[in-house]
Each structure stands twice: as C-alpha cells, then as structure tokens.
C-alpha cells in the first residue's frame, strides 16, 4: 500500500522518513555510484527542503518501508529546472501548477529481490508508479514530469508506463539521461493496472483534494 507523507509532516513519520533516506543512500550512492550527498547514512538533497509529497510503499504485514519516490510542483525548485535543464529544448520551460515532478524512485534492495512479479514488473515498482499517477489524478494534476536513466527506461517499458520523451537525451557522467512526461488520468491508471495486475487503488487513505496542497507550509 502507498502512504502519503508531506515534507512538513516528516517529524510525525520519523521511521518512514529515516527508512526512505537510508534506502536512497543504499540505492543511489552504494549501488549505482551516483554523485549524491550522503550524510549520517541518509541520501538527502536540497529538494527535500521544498516540502515534497513523498509516495511511500509500505509492507502491509510489517509496516516497513519498501520503497519511495517524491513529488514536487514544477512552479518551484525541482531537479529538471535546476539540475537537468539542458535536457529541455531552449524554448521550453516546465513551470505549471498542474505539472509536478517525480524523482528519487528507489526500492529497498532486499525487498526488490524478493518482491513478487506483478505483471511485467515487481509488486513494489507497480505500486509506486500507480501511487504517483493516482495521487496526481486525485488532486487534479495534468501530467508528471521526470528525469530518468536507462535503467528506469527499461522499468517504464515493462510497466506499460507510456512516457513521452521531451527534448534530447544526454549523457551525465556515465549515465544516459532522459526527461519525460506522463498523463495523470484514468486512462494511464487503467493501463498500469492492466500491466501490473492491480485491480483497486493502492493508496492507503484519501489524498488531499487541493492541487496546491504540497505547497502549503
């Protein structure tokens, strides 16, 4: 199931937040060897200071964290605008209250290894993708934008995640990097459910109905 946690509420969810940042450190720093900052065992960056909405996959039997991603409005600081803007055409700026950015997709390696297949992808991958699209549709977003690498591109294809590449992919260090957008609507939800085998909402509880909820401090 997917638990939604806003950045401003992180102190009320200390366990989930600690696990999320620890998993991110294991995935991005230790396994993928990305140039990320790890402090006291956490992978954390400046965008975690922007009150993101965290999409957290929770083990329904143990309440442990299995993986996560984060959502940020494109009207404020975000990775595409502030780090990977070279991926976009010179005349394109993504800054729309109805387009949010998804970033820092990660899964606990142990859970990932034993996660059962859900269609063409693992249960956790399908749950995180669906959670992001479901919350986007619920709060009235039009699209999600994301920066991703070749590893994620393969996951997207297996998950029937119909993402449209924007601009020209570029190599950052050793990693081929893409920018893409996906519609947050019922059609996308239905396609993901068909690909993954999920038949109902993956969200733990109803989401905020205000599309600017994650901006409210």
Image: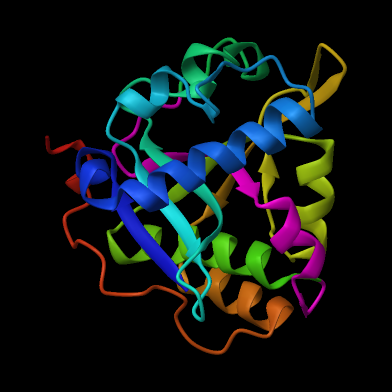
Q: Is residue 104 magenta?
A: yes
Judged left or right of residue 187, residue 114 is right
Judged left or right of residue 96, residue 29 is right
53 or 169, nearer to the observer: 53
121 or 140, nearer to the observer: 121
Task: Choose top left, top right, bottom left or bottom right for residue 177.
Answer: top right
Residue 215 location (% of width, % of height): 19, 36
Task: Choose top left, top right, bottom left or bottom right for residue 201.
Answer: bottom left
Judged left or right of residue 46, residue 158 is right
Q: Is residue 118 magenta?
A: yes
User: Could one spot residue 55 in this view of the protein?
Assistant: yes
Q: Residue at the spot x=69%, y=31% of the render?
A: 28
Q: Residue at the spot x=68%, y=85% of the render?
A: 197
Judged left or right of residue 87, residue 183 is left
Q: Is residue 193 above or below residue 73?
A: below
User: Could one spot residue 142 in this view of the protein?
Assistant: no
Task: Choose top left, top right, bottom left or bottom right for residue 24.
Answer: top right
- Please identify the residue farthest to the front as the structure is shown: 40
Q: Which region is colored magenta?
A: 94-120
Q: How is the image coloured?
A: rainbow
Residue 68 location (% of width, % of height): 53, 51
Residue 35 location (% of width, % of height): 69, 14
Q: What is the quadrant of the C terminus in the image? A: top left
Q: Residue at the spot x=66%, y=18% of the render?
A: 87
Q: Is residue 111 above or below residue 42?
A: below
Q: Residue at the spot x=49%, y=87% of the render?
A: 200
- Please identify the residue farthest to the right as the structure is shown: 174
């Amino acid at each position: 199931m997917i638990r939604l946690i806003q950045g401003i509420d992180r102190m009320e969810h200390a366990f989930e937040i600690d696990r999320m940042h620890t998993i991110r450190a294991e995935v991005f720093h230790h396994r993928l060897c990305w140039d990320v900052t790890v402090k006291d065992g956490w992978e954390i960056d400046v965008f975690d200071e922007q009150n993101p909405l965290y999409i957290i996959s929770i083990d329904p039997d143990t309440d442990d964290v299995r993986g996560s991603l984060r959502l940020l409005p494109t009207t404020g600081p975000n990775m595409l605008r502030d780090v990977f803007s070279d991926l976009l055409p010179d005349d394109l700026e993504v800054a729309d209250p109805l387009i949010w950015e998804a970033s820092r997709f990660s899964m606990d390696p142990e859970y990932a290894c034993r996660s059962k297949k859900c269609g063409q992808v693992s249960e956790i991958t399908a749950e995180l993708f669906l959670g992001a699209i479901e919350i986007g549709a619920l709060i009235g977003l039009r699209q999600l934008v994301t920066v991703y690498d070749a590893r994620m591109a393969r996951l997207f294809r297996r998950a029937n995640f119909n993402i449209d590449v924007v601009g020209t992919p570029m190599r950052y260090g050793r990693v081929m990097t893409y920018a893409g957008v996906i519609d947050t609507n019922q059609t996308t939800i239905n396609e993901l459910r068909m690909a993954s085998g999920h038949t109902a909402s993956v969200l733990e509880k109803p989401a905020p109905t205000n599309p600017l909820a994650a901006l409210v401090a």
